[in-house]
Image (cartoon, rainbow, N blue to C red):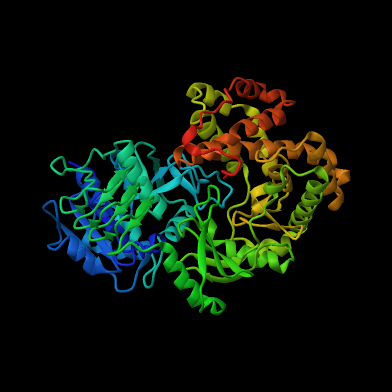
Amino acid sequence: MPLITQAFVLGAGLGMRLRPLTDDLPKPLVPIFQKPLITFAFDHLLAAGCDKLVVNTHRLPERFVDVFPESLYRGRRILFLHEPEILGTGGGIKNAHRFFRSEPFVVYSGDILTDFELTPLFEEHARAGNDVTLALRNTHFPPTIGLQGGRIVNIGGKEEEAAEYDFANVSVWNPQIISRIPSGGSVSFIPTLVEAIKKGERIGGVVVNDGKWFNIGSAKEYLEVHRVVCEEQWKPAYLDPNHHWPIRRAPSAMIDSTTTLSGFYSLGANCRVEEGVRLRNTIVWPGAQIASRSVLENCIVRTHRFEMQTDLLLRQTRLRLPAFSSGRIEISAIEKGGSDRRFYRVRCSTDQSLVLVKYNLEREENRHYVRIAEFLAAHRIRAPKVYFHDPKEGLIWIEDLGETDLFSFRDDDWLTRSALYQSVLDEIAKLHDLPEADWSELRGEMPPEFNSALYQWEQNYFFENCLGRIFHLNEAIRDKLMSLPALHRIANELASQPRVLVHRDFQSQNIIVRNGQAHLIDFQGMRPGLAEYDLASLLFDPYVHLTSDERDKLLLYYLERRDLRRNETGLRERLRFCAMQRLMQALGAYGFLGLAKGNRSFLRHVPAAIGLLRQVIADLPELNALGAALAYLPLNVDVGPRAGFSSENRP
């Protein structure tokens, strides 16, 4: 007999992060090679023995009726519960559990696609006698959940207990705990679990790092799952063997014979692609039409005619900003490194422009940008002005400071560069000098502070994504290096120091130079940490070559600027440790973004970063083993000709 036979699938989300794709279709119904996303959850649960399925809906409930006209899937009845007012994850669970037997049930997010084994989750729930058991997973983001001895001790990553995992959006609940969820309004289930943990109740977790796991929270992630299915020939083993999938071209798709198709394309039912069209890595939804001779790459075509996203952004700009409401305005994309945000320059005339930022609503860090920008302005720290913020759409209109960053001056004479770097240090010193009383108001509105867990995460990120992903270093060797006591000691020592407010990503491409003055950008990761971490990011920047003498002069300028010469010895030691941490984080990011995310231009910075890391740890005997391993790495990283590694093609 299956351990658990009933499940609640969350399908009522607003889908804001995927808009405009979800303007006319709830997110759980978006097609993945012609198969609605939520049906993967159904298949996964059915294969695990769950034959009673309940789904909540909110936006566009009629579209669920279109897809499941008799409330059936593979011959099983699906109970759809419509929420006229959205109840949230906690309220949805409380509303649905009355339809279940008095037995444990699964809660499964309808906007994930995964094939990890559910049986270990079910078995751990029964074995431990938990009230709730969460499926946990490692991701490339800083972890938010701490697990000790099978019990969850921290949710949110803000407590002292170490956070190691992320929630995999699948859990098992006992019906007895549902009464703890407040009634009325839209509520999350997280506060209920936090309160239960404080009371020492049985809230458990099990790590599920097997298989694939996708959270379809943005257009980029939606394209990524299609890429993996196509290029890696991935197919969940639980799918109905009688159902052919993936279907790259629906039988009713009307495709002109002159069309060129390449990459991970998908062509929906009754779509029409006219003559001479070239499609690469493009998803065409059912009923969409693409005009003749269109050339599309990395696009999602959802409407009956191809419409650039820029048209929507232009309309939003005219609506929000009266100065741009009439006359001709132009919009152009700005390429911006490895960010999951999109940047556009909106120009009304030669002397009137602004920058429009479209951010991913799924990443909490992106939501902090506006509040931090207002804080910086209040403390006279130079940064772009915010003109308007639409948090529901994830749109920010900000001051256009131009495209000249500190990186642009990397080949100038030292006299010019030193003056610019001094301006940069003046701005960051203002931030570091702020007393905690001034920035304590930001707590809760910025990411968790630097602590030992975050420093250790940076180290592990390096071992996994740089030494493992880029250089394929043997796992046993990586584990041995990762366990060096000095690394743990450095993380704890840095975490024990008093914190100031830090930028977090203070490198040459996140500093705009306008009229000879430095302005901070990309500061949404700002958090309490060590000033030396920002200094390390700037002075040991793999994008820019600084000599040891130049680096020392800039450090002395900063020390004098903040009257810290009397603390120079200790600061230099912390700077070295922070430089090690920062370079490990950067190298991990280069590996992840370059290989996992396909932006291979990051890989050309690996040799410089490895060289700096070797230099930083050279005088630390406890890390001789790591230094020796770095010395043997082949630094002619194979980035391949397809990335176009000219000097202009920088992340």
**Left or right placement of residue 275 versus residue 202 in this view:** left
Residue at 25%, 56% (x, y): give it.
274
Query: In the rendered view, does 553 fall on the left or right side of 351?
Result: right
The residue lying toward the viewer, choosing from 127 and 60, is 60
In the picture, residue 523 is in which quadrant? bottom right
Observer-nearest residue: 94 or 348?
Answer: 348
Task: Tell me the quadrant of the picture where the C terminus can be found.
Answer: top right
Residue 13 in percent (x, y) is at 35, 63
Residue 531 percent location from the top left of the image:
73, 48
The answer to which of 547 and 162 lies nearer the viewer is: 547
Residue lying at 56% horizontally and 68% vertically, measured from the top left: 347
Evaluate whether residue 169 shows in this view: no
Front residue (pair 195, 225): 225
The image quadrant where one finds the N terminus is top left
Would you identify the image quadrant in which residue 525 lies?
Answer: bottom right
* Residue 112 to residue 359: above or below: above
Residue at 29% x, 51% y is: 276
Q: On the picture, is 9 further left or further right than 312?
A: left
| Number of numbered tags placed on the structure image | 0
Q: What is the x, y in percent for residue 480?
A: 55, 23
Q: Position of residue 403 (x, y in %)?
A: 63, 56
Residue 570 visible from this viewpoint? yes
